[in-house]
Amino acid sequence: MIELAFTYADFGDGKYAQLAEECQMSACAAGFDRVTRLPGGERHNLMLKRIEGLKNHMREAEGDLVYSDCDMRWLKSPEPLFDGSFDVGVMWRTGNPAMPYLSCLVLLSRASEAAVNFVTEWWFTIATMPKEMQGWWGDQIALASMLGRQKPNTTVDFDGCRVRIFDSGPIIHNTAGKKAPDGFYAIHHKGLLK
């Protein structure tokens, strides 16, 4: 059993409505067993509310849980990434030392207690940031604060939680509007409508 959960927040302009629907349908076609839309927040507290929604939803998950942005178009199921070697998987990227981890895709193995504790700490870290940080980028800054600067393809211990640092390069294709080369799991329409 593998579930996709994502947060959709409409800021009144409806820009993401069609894209989010298409991405949700792509997850079903890619083989996810369940797709769940979580409630979003407002622009000023979006990151805080999206991680709060994830935290609250994790206890309901029946299997492995994938948390992603609403603008991720799924090409194939990420089930092969769940090899039992981690509780939480985060995506590492190059070129942004202040925010080396992406929050557009987080893998949570069997919603373990260690994973629940990690996401709870992630939410708490965002909640204690200045208000202006809780809206945009706060989730990525919080991950950097919690994990420090790790290398990709390593596993680190965070208070008893095995956190796998995946290299996002071969997993997420970030060039919206262009066909993804074979092998990618998803296309992130990052910036397409933002």
Image (tube, helix red, strand yellow):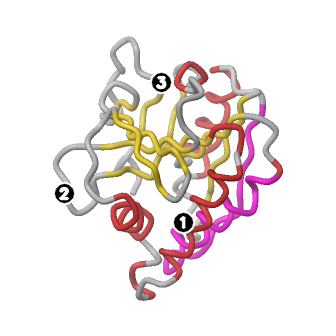
* 32 displayed left or right of 191: right
What is the x, y in percent for residue 176?
35, 35
Q: Does the segment drawn in magenta span residue 76? A: no
Name the residue: 34% across, 24% down.
170
In terms of image quadrants, where is residue 121?
bottom right
Q: Residue at x 61, y 40 (%)?
A: 66
Residue density around tag 3, few if under 14, some if 14–19, many if 20 or more, within 10 Å: many
Point 63% across, 20% down: residue:
30
Measured Cα–Cα span from mark 2 to mark 1: 32 Å
At label 2, the amino acid type is: Pro
Q: Which residue in the protein does label 1 denote?
A: 13
Q: Give the percent coordinates (x, y) of residue 143.
A: 40, 61
Q: Determine the CA span between mark 1 and mark 3.
A: 29 Å
Based on the picture, tell me whether residue 50 belongs to the magenta stretch: yes
Disc 3 marks which residue? 185
Of the two numbered discs 2 and 1 on the same chain, state the one appearing first in sequence: 1
* Residue highlighted by disc 2: 97
Magenta region, main secondary structure: helix
Camera-near label (3 vs 2) is: 2
Q: Residues within 10 Å of mark 1 (few under 14, many from 20)?
A: few
Residue 8: horizontal and vertical position, in percent?
62, 57
In the picture shown, does residue 64 fall above or below 131? above
